[in-house]
Amino acid sequence: MGAYEQKKEKCGTVCLKYLLFTFNFLFWLAGGVVMAVGVWTLVEKSDYISLLSSKTYAASAYILVLAGAIVMVTGVLGCCATFKEQRRLLRVYFVLLLCIFLLEILAGILAYIYYQQLNEELKQNLRETMTQKYEQKTHEQITRAVDKLQQEFKCCGSNSSSDWAESTWIRSRDAKGRIVPDSCCKTPGELCGRRDHPSNIYKVEGGCITKLEKFILDHLKIIGAVGVGIACVQV
């Protein structure tokens, strides 16, 4: 009878170990997903970040990258702690779990807060950024971001193509008679911005501001959902 109970207890312990190992492996994969979303936001769409005055959008992505990296380390540590049965490793494991939980909740909260204030920020700053900093020597990144924005979203100007009439660059000799940047053109080419007819340039209702706002809001939803979602799974 004693041998049977001992065997049963040993079997239960082994099953528990493998269950925890499976959990930690899935946890490690989840960390990879979190990290990938953060890196993708920072690398793939980094140009657009330069058009935003607030750093909240970038901060929430950096937090996800950090949380994802810690999750992956924690997953490995959890596997080691499970099989080696070391109390010290288990303590570190649970402390890291708490840190990850707090970081992911923070990323989700930041994404939600910025979601609420994005429209006002874009209204106040995007037009000024585009007209005052485009094609200026100290703002090459903003010039690239504006060109990419107008071509990728098929738009011209912050609210409309007429915004470019107030541009510091358009008013200068460097523009060579352009009315809008060449990136406004449906078929970009040297000096194509001299004609602002709808057949030549993008005339989108609401301009680039509505396109950029929708793009960032969609990404904030992803960042918030991933951060809070993984945190809920941990609980």
Image (spheres, rainbow, N blue to C red):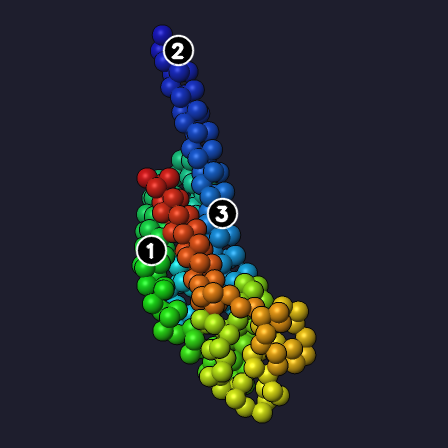
Q: Can residue 49 be seen in this view?
A: no
Question: Which numbered disc flags the more N-terminal residue, 2 or 1?
Answer: 2
143 shown above or below 49: below
Image quarter of residue 174: bottom right
Q: In this figure, which residue is indicated by the disc labeled 1? A: 112
**C-alpha span from label 2 to label 3:** 44 Å
Is tag 2's residue or tag 3's residue first in the polypeptide sequence?
2
Residue at (56, 79) in percent of width and height: 180
Q: Is mark 1 on a helix, strand or loop?
A: helix
Residue extending furthest bottom?
173
User: Where 100 sits versus 120, above or below?
Assistant: above
- The numbered mark at residue 33 is 3
Q: How crowded is mark 1: few (under 14 residues within 10 Å), some or many (20 or more)?
A: some
Residue at mark 2:
4
Amino acid type indicated by mark 3:
Val
Q: Residue at x 44, y 58 (%)?
A: 214
Give coordinates of residue 145: x percent, y percent: 53, 71
Tell me residue 196's x, y (percent): 58, 76
Tell me the SS state at disc 2. helix
| 2 and 1 marks in contact (CB < 8 Å) | no
The location of residue 4, given as percent across then percent down, is: 39, 11
Please name the amino acid that badge 1 sits on: Tyr
Q: What residue type is labelled 2?
A: Tyr
